Image: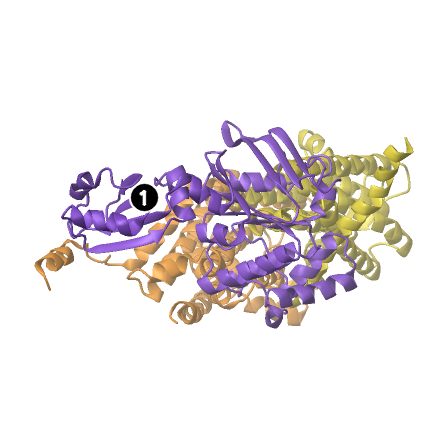
Chain colours: A yellow, B purple, C orange
Amino acid sequence: MVTLVLPRLLDVSGASRRSGSVVERNVAALKSVYWLLLVSGFVEPLLYLLSIGVGVGALVGDLTLPGGELVTYAAFVAPAMLASSAMTGALAETTFNFFGKMKYMKLYDGVIATPVRPFEIALGELAWAMLRGSAYSAAFLAVMVLMDLTTVARALVAFPAAVLVGFAFGALGMMLSTFMRSWQDFDLMGSAQFTLFLFSGTFVPAEAYPSLLRWVVEVTPLYRAVHLIRGISVGTAGWSWLPDVLYLLVVLTLGLLVASRRMGRLLYK
Amino acid sequence: MTRAQPLIQARGLVKRFGDFTAVDGIDVEVRSGEAFGFLGPNGAGKSSTMRMVGCISPPSGGELRILGMDPVRDGPAIRARLGVCPQLDNLDPELTVRENLTTYARYFGIPRRTARARAAELLDFVQLSERADSKVEPLSGGMKRRLTIARALVNEPEIVLLDEPTTGLDPQARHLVWERLFRLKQQGVTLVLTTHYMDEAEQLCDRLVVMDGGRIVAEGSPRALIERHSTREVVELRFAAESQEAFAGKLDGLGERVEVLPDRILLYVADGDAAVAEVGALGLTPANVLVRRSSLEDVFLHLTGRTLVD
Amino acid sequence: MSVAQQARERARPPLPRVPAVAVFAHYLVGYRRTWRAGVFSSFLLPVLTVLGFGVGVGAYIDQGVDGVRYLDWIVPGLIASTALQVAIGESTWPVFSNFQWIKTYFAQSAAPLRVGDILTGHLAFVLFRVLTTIAAFLLVTALFGALRSPWALATLPVVALLGLAVAAPTFAYASVVSSDSWLAMLFRFAVIPMTLFAGVFFPVESLPVALRWLAYLTPLWHGVDLCRAAALGVAAQWSVPGHLLYLAAWALGGWLLARRGFRRKLVV
């Protein structure tokens, strides 16, 4: 029995080491302009916050949340920007870049000839996407605190939530990439992503949508993510975050499982 | 594992892609320290076989053992001891030459310091030290190939799989690659390669199999194959006429086999000079006569035909 | 010249009278296969933005902007920014790829085409994409009743000019950058800020003075102001000939730079 179980236990450290080597490759690939692109990544949600939150916010004025709190439009929009930027960042790394490495650069064809397995490649790429996304989330939360859109305590709780959102979308994106046939499919995915961005209670409370739309929106992952982070950054304490967290955990697990299965089939031809 | 046990052993190995059977039940044994070649035209099933041996393509049937292990179950453990140089270079275009080796070494769990030292050694071995910090993209085809070979050696493999190692290279680069592979063989590394260059097979392989349509059609050392499937010498005759056909009939019965091509006639004979004398005795005066030793190319074309397969 | 040679010369077809048209046709052939995937992103998305943002957020803006409903106010802005997105999208990766990856330009320059033909033919295709997208967009917004004046049709020539004003310099940029990461940088530091702050979503007057002047410098603001004047049937905020000249200057300057960039790559 011991001889059967032990190698598997030992292999957990082997797997994480091998996933780590995939992250190392990405670090080694960071050259001048990639760095610039990477570091500047966090300005994007900030620009949206300033334009929509502050610029359009001046036209909208204050909003009353379903819980009865009166908040500025910027404070309302900011958590949604954080959630959607966690989504966008994670998806960019795990779909566009991942697909490019798999199909175009044929990078993984070289990697699978080594002891590294497809599941470990998937984990490594996801970990890398998360390292990057978490840094953006932290920077954005710091800006939110500086602009008085949330408190330090709330921001500290919102951070792990944003990381979870990133993980869930990262796994989802990786799964989607294994189904992609060509670059044109990414156009469709980008469109779906933008549609989610528009209708996930991002700019107006979901309560304002027609009821049918609202029910559809309620089950989409970005809505759950916005709901979770907004609840933390401006809402009142309660258990309402629990279904959101569970939902995202399920997406994460499912995405990773399907992704590694499909990758195995795509690469081990 | 005993010494006598082959490193690679395949029995009735099959690979199917949907309805298409790429490899159709082959038996192969590769022993430690030898250089083993798969020869065959495009589409013969060489690369599919190589991918199965590389444990990145599960067999559809038959039996395959590599280093005494099962490639499906023990993939990572086997791959840790293999070096693979695929048909198309899949180097990392975002990394430098040196980084391509060091990051690849990390996939095998080789410590960073060792990886750096080994990268330096290997770059020296494939004569790329001067380009160590260059990006991959501007390298010439031959340099990329050498880098891919160096990458395949980064884990000090027991078996190196080379899928068409010199296709597309210029003569200088080919000879450099051959020389490096020969040195590896001297160091006791087992080489398994595919090629459709006969000179490459004659230069490098101790033993080889000729594949065609997914099956093995001949097996043996290059010398033995020539002896078994061709004559000792070949006479090439060119007649100064629009068609060689007219002369072919007159040459019937000369040597073991007469082959008529659009631009020349080949006589497969034991003694070339004697055959040329007989041609003269028939009153024929070819514009051009060449007597040469039979080569693996003659065997190959005889076994797999002259028609284009792709 | 031998008789056979002369016969061959005679049998050779005459060169196309306007070679750029042949180049344009090349892109249309490719587009026939890929247009479906693009329809969603280049046309449905702006419509969804009208719904999700214009209608949704508009409901919370009681007083409207400059005396008009927020929805009516934002539609012409979205027309201009959609034209910008399509024009720049079509002149970044596609141009870069034609040099670096698929190398279409090199294949074309081996045919009897001049650099200007190759450039103009591709720009014509970008213009085609901008015009078809915006025409469809206008049709749908008209069905929504968000167009209030037949003058809205005047947005078509405006977006054509705006498209050229941003596509031509982008062609120049894409022809000189060394890595496609620079294209992503263009979106991050030019396209997205322009879209967000050049008067599409809220009036530039509410920006701090320094930023307001930056917004005035962008070609997008000039396009937005013209589109808004046309679609709402009101006077432009700035002189119309001034707008047109400014955009034309971008287009011309961009074209000259692009031709220089293309020459450097293609004529070696």
Q: Residue at image x 73%, y 66%?
A: B117
Instruction: Using the image as rendered, state which of residue B167 and residue A136 is in the foreground.
Output: B167
Q: What residue type is disc 1 on?
A: Tyr
Classify mark 1: residues with Cα within 10 Å, few (<14), some (14-19) or many (20+).
Answer: many
Instruction: Using the image as rendered, state which of residue B81 and residue C91 is in the foreground.
Output: B81
B195 to B184, vertically: above or below? above
Q: Which residue is mark 1?
A: B268
- Asked if residue A43 shows in the view, the reply is no
**Which element carries disc 1, helix, strand or loop?**
strand
Residue with the most extreme left position: C3
Residue A245 position in % (x across, y down): 83, 38
**Left or right: where does residue B250 sit relative to residue C104?**
left
**Left or right: where does residue A4 sit relative to residue B90?**
right
Residue B101 position in % (x across, y down): 67, 60
Q: Quadrant of the N terminus of chain B?
A: top right
Q: Which chain letter matches label 1?
A: B
